[in-house]
Amino acid sequence: QFANQANVEIHRTTTAEEVWKDTDGEVDIFIAGVGTGGTVTGVGQVLKERKPGVQIIAVEPSDSPLLSEGKAGPHKIQGLGANFVPEILDRSVIDEIITRDLDESLTYARRAASEEGILAGISGGAALSAAADVAARPENAGKTIVVIVPDFGERYLSTLLFEGFVG
C-alpha cells in the first residue's frame, strides 16, 4: 500500500470524485490523516487540478511528526504515522500539516460517537480534531471543509478509546 500507485489511483477515481460531486466543486479545505499517503495524495492531486486554491491539510501524530519536523517515534494513533515517508506520498499537494496527540484524538472520536452518532476510530478522531481547529480559524468562516474519517470505531470497542465510555 505504501508504494503501490493503485492506492493513489483509487482515491483519484473514487474518493476525489465523491468529494467533488458532493460539494458541487465548492470544497475549500480538504483534511486527511497520512498513513499510506494514498488518500491525501490522490484526492489532493485531483482537487488541486480542478481548484488550485483548495487547501490540502495532512494530519500526523504529534509523537511522530515525521512530515512536519522530520522526527519519527512510537505513537498510539493507529493508521497514521508509519514512521517513514510513504513512497506514494506527493508532498507537493500538501499545504499544511497538523499534528495531533492521543488525548485529542480520543476526545474527538468519543465526541463523534456521543454527539453525532459517528463511531470513528482513533485516526478519525485525530482528523476531526484537526478539522475543528481549522474550522475555528476566523479566515475559514463560511468555507466548505471536508474531513476524511478513515476508520470505524467498532474495532476499538474493547480498547482505550471506549474504556469507561458511556455515550
Image: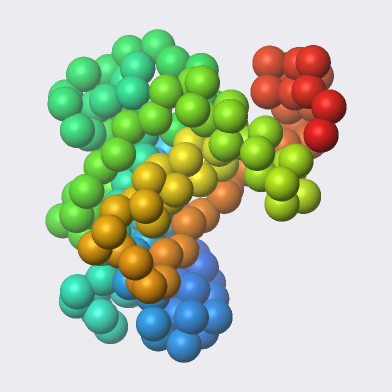
Relative to 164, does residue 135 appear above or below in the rendering? below
In the depicted view, which residue is nearer to us: 95 or 93?
95
Q: What is the quadrant of residue 83 in the picture? A: top left
In the depicted view, which residue is nearer to us: 144 or 92?
144
Q: Position of residue 162 (x, y in %)?
A: 75, 23
Q: What is the quadrant of residue 92 in the picture? A: bottom left
Q: Is residue 150 left or right of residue 62?
A: right
Outermost residue to the bottom: 24
Q: Position of residue 84 (x, y in %)?
A: 29, 27
Q: Is residue 70 left or right of residue 10?
A: left
Residue at the spot 28% in from the left edge and 83% down from the top edge: 50
Q: What is the quadrant of residue 99 in the picture? A: top left
Residue at the spot 25% in from the left edge and 42% down from the top edge: 97
- Judging from the image, the colouring scheme is rainbow
Which quarter of the rendered picture does the C terminus lie within?
Answer: top right
Relative to 122, does residue 120 appear above or below in the rendering? below
Residue at the spot 75% in from the left edge and 31% down from the top edge: 155
Q: Is residue 25 left or right of residue 159?
A: left
Q: Is residue 86 visible?
A: no
Residue at the spot 42% in from the left edge and 23% down from the top edge: 101
Q: Position of residue 151 (x, y in %)?
A: 63, 43
Relative to 149, does residue 34 appear above or below in the rendering? above
Relative to 146, does residue 91 appear above or below in the rendering? above
Q: Is residue 111 visible?
A: yes
In the depicted view, which residue is nearer to us: 105 or 85?
105
Q: Position of residue 148 (x, y in %)?
A: 51, 54
Outermost residue to the top: 74
